[in-house]
Amino acid sequence: MLSLLSITIANAQEKAVPVFTDGEAQIVEAFSNPDDWIRHDLWVETTFDTDGDGKLDRMHVDVTRPKQTDTEGLKLPIVYESSPYYAGVAGDADGLFWDVNHELGEVEKPRTHVEVVRTGERPIISNSQIRTWVPRGYIVVHSSSPGTGLSQGAPTVGGINESLAPKAVIDWLNGRAKGYTTPDGDEAVEAFWSTGKVGMTGTSYNGTIPLAAATTGVEGLEAIIPIAPNTSYYHYYRSNGLVRSPGGYLGEDIDVLYDFIHSGDESKRAYNNKTVRDTEMKNGLDRLTGDYNDFWAGRDYLNQMKPMKAALLMSHGFNDWNVMPEHSYRIYKAAKEQGLPSQIYYHQFGHGGPPPMSMMNRWFTHYLHGVDNGVENDAKAWIVRENDNMQKPTAYKDYPNPDAKQVVMYLGKGGMIAGNLQANKDKKQGKEVLVDDATISGNDLAQAEKSKNRLLYVSPILTEDLHISGVPQISVTLASSKPAANLSVWLVSLPWNSEKGTKITENIITRGWADPQNHKSISESEPLKPGKFYTVTFDLQPDDQVIPKGQQIGLMIFSSDSQFTILPKPGTELTIDLDKTTLQLPIVGGEEALKKATK
């Protein structure tokens, strides 16, 4: 006859629990049947009222959890994703984007506003993350961000309520905030199945929100994995004082994105539009000067990082020209400086792209389940090399590569065809002139054998591969024929490969943009005095790329970029002082590696 103790042990052994092998959460059969998952929704009360109805806004939340959280009293950690996109977005409409075909500093004509038709049915907000994490012993939670879907409030596109909303959900998961079965009722819902440990992830805007939540310092948010996050709306819509569109969305700005996501309660939209879009945004976004101001500073998460405690695994693509790679690097760098556990994963492709599942699994396993898998001692940087699979990154001590050193490169005359880009400075190279013409694309300018519309300076043909790792910096001394001008800089690999199916890692190495009127600072602009020389110094986008032997590195300086900038009529002249213009290039092995590759 079995003893009572034996029966107790047998019953305990029958209970489903998370399983870990080699430091990773494994798929557990008892958690894997979707028909057994418990799915429900609720509204979490926040600490703000942004739709002006005199009541605290409530966020719509959904939960997907294994049945054992009910039947066996199992408590599990949470993988949480929040988004403004779950209930649908506005369609494209003529005039939705700002018309960029005008002179710099000219007041633009009004654009067209659009309305979102809300989609989706309760209780499911989203199915993302569920099939990945629930079978591995997690609960998955989603929430619609303020003013979207069935969440109350107003979208602010980076305003404080978009940080406080996910904080409220995490507080609810830890028993510190109130949840209700309906948006206006008082029947409470408690997260009795939660361990209180939360990890957040998501891509693009959905990757921004984990960072926004983390900057509140909320207790319980243990780890975040932002993928291609927008970490500063200024850096998304501006570059060094220049009004610049995100790649593929010429004429988009923060107020356009507001219209695009505003899928919340129709009866609240007029108030939200007046308060947020037509007042705060209209007064703050400043498309005339492109200057950094208090409006943009309040939507820059780098300024808000001090309270952050969550462990950070950052992911981004070096060829993401929508949310550019500076967004991830600036936050990773700051997190390291604060002593936070941090890793970064970079691939060579475009927008999006999560780290390999094994990396994410180890991160959440350690920080949410408390398994001592040594992830905090793993390599700090993981970079997918040019021809490798995204699932097989190469480990490095850090990013930028600690062996990279900034090498100063100088210009030699002849840029209308191809001047020199070299480590040695030749005296008295003089000045060269380019004529702005936004009707010619940067791709065409880079391939032109000769052009008056750009200046091109090229290195010797590389005799060995050259590894660039870090943030190139350009310092251009120029004069403009007009009080305002665009300045665009591309770093390219030549000869240009124009064949169909060219890899994204070919041709464009990195690039950057600036407003010469902001030569003193991005917060202060002043009209240029035609003919007067100014020095403009700014960073290009971070990169880690091996330029193969047989190629040349080309520095292309031009004015308006047809894919990104305001597009004035052709004719503005920029005069470049070659003797006072330099490029700092972060090269692994420094000057010795450059000499070896160009001898």
Image: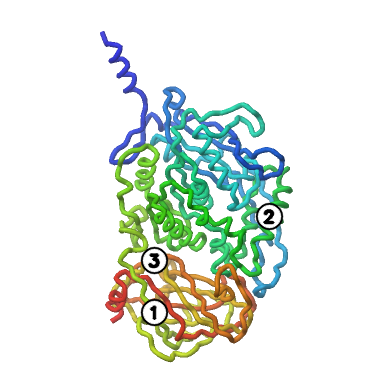
- Is residue 482 left or right of 302 when viewed as pictured? right
Q: Distance between the Cα atoms at labels 3 and 1? A: 15 Å
Q: Quadrant of residue 479?
A: bottom right
Residue kind at label 2, given as amino acid type: Arg
Query: Vertically, is 322 above or below 32?
Result: below
- Is residue 233 left or right of 219 when viewed as pictured? right
Disc 3 crowd rating (10 Å Cα; few below 14, some 14-19, many 20+) is many
Q: Residue at x 46, y 75 (%)?
A: 474
Disc 1 crowd rating (10 Å Cα; few below 14, some 14-19, many 20+) is some
Query: Vertically, is 350 above or below 572?
Result: above
Given residues 526 and 436, the one toward you in this image is 526
Q: Residue at x 43, y 46 (%)?
A: 310
| Residue topped by disc 2 | 277
Q: Distance between the Cα atoms at labels 1 and 2? A: 45 Å
The image quadrant where one finds the C terminus is: bottom left
Q: How is the image coloured?
A: rainbow
| Residue topped by disc 3 | 470
Residue 230 seen in the current view: no
Query: Vertically, is 354 above or below 531?
Result: above
Asked whether the residues under the numbered discs 1 and 2 touch, taking CB atoms below 8 Å apart as contact, a structural biologist would say no
Query: Please, which residue is most extreme toward the top here?
Result: 1
Q: Find residue 186 and report its horizontal and vertical position in percent.
A: 64, 28
For marks 3 and 1, the one nearer the N-term is 1
Q: Residue at x 50, y 87 (%)?
A: 432
Could you say which disc has been placed on residue 587 in the image? none
Q: Secondary structure at mark 3?
A: strand
The image quadrant where one finds the N terminus is: top left
Could you say which disc has been placed on residue 409 in the image? 1
